[in-house]
């Protein structure tokens, strides 16, 4: 019984679990907004290339 209580109170792997959950959420957001993100990046790069020609 003491081993089970020690296992439940152990917080050694909590940081790893938090990082994995953050990565899962970020990947999910990227997958949801993929088309909007690619359109935004393409627009930014086209503005950069068009304005760099004027320099």
Image: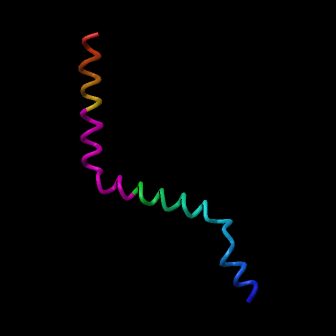
Which one is in front, 10 or 39? 10
Which image quarter holds the C terminus? top left
Residue at left 60%, top 61%? 16
Q: Is residue 41 above or below residue 35?
A: above
Q: Quadrant of residue 52?
A: top left
Quarter holding the N terminus is bottom right
Q: Is residue 26 left or right of residue 45?
A: right
Magenta stretch secondary structure, dominant: helix
Q: Is residue 29 magenta?
A: yes
Q: Give the percent coordinates (x, y) of residue 40.
A: 26, 39
Based on the picture, tell me whether residue 34 belongs to the magenta stretch.
yes
The residue positioned 48% from the left and 56% from the top of the image is 23
Q: Is residue 45 above or below residue 16?
A: above
Q: Residue 28 occupies which quadrant of the picture? A: bottom left
Q: Position of residue 37 (x, y in %)?
A: 29, 44
Count of numbered badges drawn on the protein: 0
Q: Position of residue 20 (x, y in %)?
A: 52, 60
2 above or below 55? below
The type of colouring in the image is rainbow
**Residue lying at the far right of the rendered structure:** 2
Residue at image location 29% in from the left, 29% down from the top? 45
Question: Which residues fall within the magenta stretch?
Answer: 28-43
Residue extending furthest toward the top: 55
Residue 6, position in %: x, y? 72, 78
Left or right of 5? Residue 15 is: left
Task: Examine the rendered structure and indicate whether residue 18 appears above or below residue 46.
Answer: below
């Amino acid at each position: 019984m003491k081993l089970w209580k020690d296992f439940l109170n152990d917080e050694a792997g909590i940081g790893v679990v938090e990082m994995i959950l953050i990565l899962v959420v970020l990947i999910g957001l990227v997958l949801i907004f993929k088309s909007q993100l690619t359109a935004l990046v393409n627009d930014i790069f086209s503005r950069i290339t068009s304005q760099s020609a004027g320099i």
